[in-house]
Image: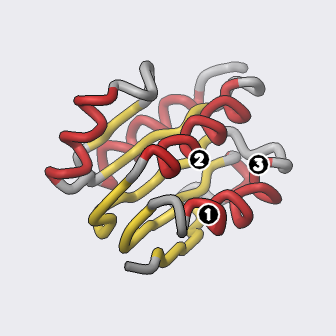
Amino acid sequence: MPLDIQFKNSPEGPRYGAMTVELSGSLDGATAPELERQLTPILETQLTDLVFDLEKLNFISSAGFRVFANARKRLKERGGQASFVRLQPQIQEVFEIIKALPGIGIFKSIEEIDSHLALRQRRPR
């Protein structure tokens, strides 16, 4: 199954260093390199918060987790974070089983992540 990748600015826009990545389909060994390729130029900016909206993601493999881990590491180096929102039950279960990304933010709704991002952006860095 292919992977569809959509980049969207968060409600506060890029001036606050936040962006949402909507993924749908399958994030596996065949599709993870494309996500990594598209994330590379974004992670080279001053972006600090990256939200992965996984509402339409049906499958993830270890290759997909590697992309998430690399993004998280790059963001953390500049005081940012990668967060995940609206995980399908099977994806949530994989996150819980693997515990591959300790300390990540997982949120139930866009409103919850928006509130979290707003609080982060109001804090002095």
Q: Amino acid at mark 3?
A: Leu
The single residue placed furthest to the front in the displayed view is 29
Query: Residue beneath label 2, please?
Result: 67
> Nearer the N terminus, badge 2 or badge 3?
3
Query: Compared with residue 117, is residue 57 higher up or lower down, i.e. above or below?
Result: below
Query: Residue beneath label 1, please?
Result: 35
Q: Is residue 36 left or right of residue 85?
A: right
Q: Is label 2 or label 3 in front? A: 2
Q: Amino acid at mark 1?
A: Leu
Residue 118 percent across, percent down from the top left: 50, 39
Query: Residue beneath label 3, please?
Result: 43
**Cα separation between marks 1 and 2:** 8 Å
- Residue drawn where x is 82% and y is 43% of the image: 46
Graded by Cα atoms within 10 Å as few (under 14), some (14 to 19) or many (20 or more), the crowding at tag 1 reads some
> Nearer the N terminus, badge 1 or badge 2?
1
Q: Is residue 76 left or right of residue 95?
A: right
Are the residues at dot 1 and dot 2 in contact (C-beta closer than 8 Å)? Answer: yes
